Image (spheres, helix red, strand yellow):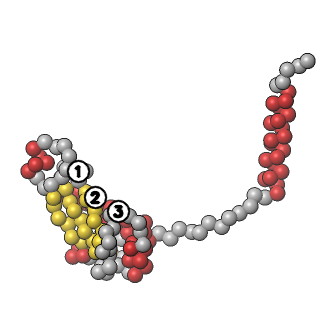
Amino acid sequence: MLRISHNVAIPDHEITLSAIRAQGAGGQNVNKVSSAVHLRFDVPRSSLPDFYKQRLLALHDHRLNGEGVIVIKAQSHRSQEKNRAEALQRLREMIISAGRVVKKRRPTKPTRGSQQKRLDSKTRHGRTKALRGKIY
């Protein structure tokens, strides 16, 4: 069971993990051992709350295909178990980040005091530079 928060968890039967051969350099080990892990998670058919489902399906992420299935490939470690843990962690982070609500920014104006302070600073700096000129 993959725990997302205190009251949200994904049962193991909803996550499909399959071992595949890793790409890239690695010598003989890469050719004979299936150490990379392919994780598939079907968002629409999952038991996640609707809030998470809507937010995940609205993401513009290359790991989310047209049917709403998240596909994560982990192959950075040499051991299958570490790659499996990494894939599950990446899925967990993706769901958590989709569920995070960003506070809307309210535009603010600088205070009159801060504007005056800035202008005074500019005037002082200008006077300092004027004193550096040539003396005739």
Can you tell which mark lies on residue 62?
3
Residue drawn 82% across the image and 54% down it: 113
Q: Quadrant of the N terminus?
A: bottom left
- Give the residue type that dot 1 points to: His
Dot 2: within a 10 Å radius of its alpha carbon, few (fewer than 14), some, or many (20 or more) residues?
some
- Name the residue beneath numbered marker 2: 86
Q: CA distance from mark 3 to mark 1?
A: 22 Å
| Horizontal side, residue 78 vs residue 91: left or right | left
- Give the residue type that dot 2 points to: Glu
The image shows residue 116 at horizontal and vertical percentages of: 83, 51
Q: Are marks 3 and 2 in contact (CB under 8 Å)?
A: no
Give the residue furthest to the top: 136
- Secondary structure of residue under mark 3: loop
Front position in the image: 111 or 62: 62
Mark 3 or mark 2: whose residue is earlier in sequence: 3
Q: Establish if 120 lies above or below 89.
A: above
Residue drawn 38% across the image and 69% down it: 95
Q: Establish if 39 lies above or below 28.
A: below
| Horizontal side, residue 68 vs residue 121: left or right | left
Can you tell which mark lies on residue 77?
1
- Secondary structure of residue under mark 2: helix
Q: Quadrant of the C terminus?
A: top right
Q: Are marks 1 and 2 in contact (CB under 8 Å)?
A: yes
